[in-house]
Image (tube, grey):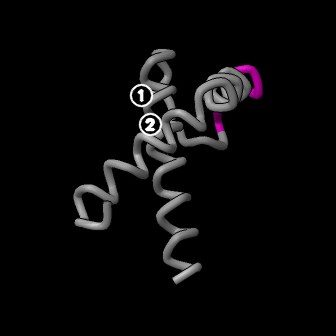
Amino acid sequence: MAKRNKIMSEEILDQFKYEIAEQLGIKNKIETQGWANMTSYECGKIGGKIGGAMVKVMIRNAEKYLMENGKL
């Protein structure tokens, strides 16, 4: 069960990173060039946004997941 929760957490975090990248206008670059070709500045902008609002969004996503799966 712990392994499943870790995988779910990683998927949610990845989804959140792409949401932030879309807001910053760099999602297309990530999808076409990959994370390895992003500048540290671009990755830092994503990380900064995640750190600022991550808990709120992670809770919202977890609640949504639990409601959709009948566990809340």
Query: Which residue is located at x 50 percent, y 22 percent?
Result: 26
9 to the left or right of 61:
right
At x 49%, y 77%, the residue is: 4
State the extent of the magenta-drawn residues as a range: 37-41
Task: Assign the magenta stretch its main secondary structure.
Answer: helix
State the image coordinates of residue 15 (x, y, percent, origin top left): 44, 44
Q: What residue type is labelled 1?
A: Asn
Residue at 49% across / 35% down in the picture?
57
Quadrant where the image shows the C terminus: bottom left
Query: Can you give x and y, in whole percent of width and height, for residue 8 in the image?
Result: 47, 64
Q: Type of residue at label 2?
A: Thr
Quadrant of residue 38 within the rendered picture: top right
Q: In this view, does 3 lie above or below 47?
A: below
Residue under label 1, please give it.
28
User: Do the residues bearing badges 1 and 2 touch, measured as CB atoms within 8 Å?
Assistant: yes
Identify residue for label 2: 32
Left or right? Give the position of 50 relative to 23: right
On the image, the x and y values in percent for residue 59 come to 49, 43
Element type where label 1 sits in the image: helix
- Left or right: 5, with 35 as reference point: left
